[in-house]
Image (cartoon, rainbow, N blue to C red):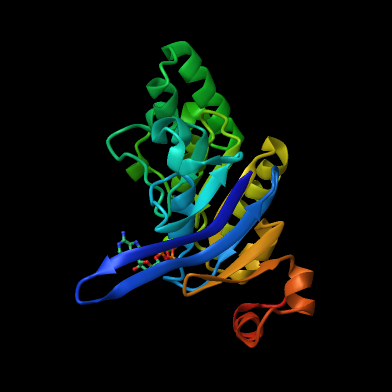
Amino acid sequence: MIHFEGATVLFPREGAEPLAAVRDLDLHVAPGETVCLVGPSGCGKTTSLRLVNRLVRPTAGRVLVDGRDVAEADPVRLRRGIGYVIQSGGLFPHLTVAANVGLLCRLEGWDTARTAERVDELLELVHLPPSEFGARYPAELSGGQRQRVGVARALALDPQLLLMDEPFGALDPLTRDSLQREFLELSERVEKTILIVSHDMDEAFLLGDRVALLAEGRLAQVGTLEQFRDAPASEQVRTFLESHFHGR
Ligand SMILES: Nc1ncnc2c1ncn2[C@@H]1O[C@H](COP(=O)(O)OP(=O)(O)OP(=O)(O)O)[C@@H](O)[C@H]1O
Ligand SMILES: [Mg+2]
C-alpha cells in the first residue's frame, strides 16, 4: 500500500550542509497493516509521514501509494484519499466539532443531510455522543477529546490509508491508555492501512503490527517485538531498546 523507495529529504540550511531529515528510507506498509514509526525527537518521523501525502517532496528516491508515485498524483485527490491526524490535533478553533469533522465532506460537495449523518456516525465511532459534543468548539474539549475529534475528521471520507502523527502524545497516562485501547478496537473494525508515529517504544509495539525505528533520519530496524528482542540489528538498536523499553 505504501512503498518508500530510497526516499531522502534534505532541508537546506544557512551556512551549513543541508540537513538530512530522512536518509535513503526503504519501507513497505502492506494493505491492512499498522506500522509505527518510532525514534527520538528530530529523527525524521513527521517528515517521513508527510512524504506520503506529499506535504514534503523527496530530494531523492520516491514514495508509492497503491503502486503510484505520489509525485505524479494530483495532490488534492491524493490527500482526500489519505486520512491525516496532525501532531498537535490541528482542529480549526472557530469551527464547531461537527463542522471540523464534516469539513472534508463539505469540500467534496456532499449535501447538508448526508454530511450531518456522516458526522454523527463518526462521532459515535470515537465515543463522543454527537448531541453532547457536535456543537462545541475545540477550546471546550479536553485534550483527549480533541484528539478523538482529529481521528474522526481523518476518517470522514473513509480513506484506505491513515497517517497519524503522535495522536496520543501530550496526554496523561490514563487518558492515553484508554485512547490506545480505542485505537486498537477501531483499527480492527475499520480495516485501514495505518502509518502511525510515536516516540514511545511501549506504545509503538502496542499499536503497530511492526515497528520502524528511525535514528537521525535512517531506518535502524523494522520488525515485530520478537524480531527486535531476538535480533537487534545493531549495537545502537540494542542500546536504544534497553534505555527506552519498559519491558512488555
Ligand atoms: N520544513 C523544514 N525545514 C527545515 N528543517 C526541517 C523542516 N521540517 C523538519 N525539519 C528538521 O528535520 C528534522 C526531522 O524533523 P521531524 O519533524 O521529521 O522530526 P520528528 O522525528 O517528527 O521529531 P518530533 O518527535 O520532535 O516530532 C529535524 O531536525 C527538523 O528540525
Ligand atoms: Mg514529529
Q: Position of residue 61 (x, y in %)?
A: 49, 56
Query: In the figure, 218 relative to 198: above or below?
Result: below
Q: Nearer the viewer, residue 7 or 155?
A: 7
View extreme (front): residue:
60
The answer to whether one can see residue 221 in this image is yes
The answer to whether one can see residue 170 in this image is no
Quadrant for residue 196, please give it. bottom right
Query: In the figure, 200 relative to 105: above or below?
Result: below
The residue that appears at 32% across and 32% down in the rendered structure is: 95
The residue that appears at 44% across and 15% down in the rendered structure is: 110
Q: Position of residue 170 (x, y in %)?
A: 45, 62
Q: In this image, 68 relative to 149: left or right?
A: right
Q: Position of residue 221 (x, y in %)?
A: 64, 71
Q: Position of residue 185 (x, y in %)?
A: 70, 45
Q: Nearer the viewer, residue 148 or 221?
A: 221
The residue that appears at 72% across and 74% down in the rendered structure is: 228
Query: In the figure, 114 relative to 6: above or below?
Result: above
The residue that appears at 56% across and 54% down in the rendered structure is: 4
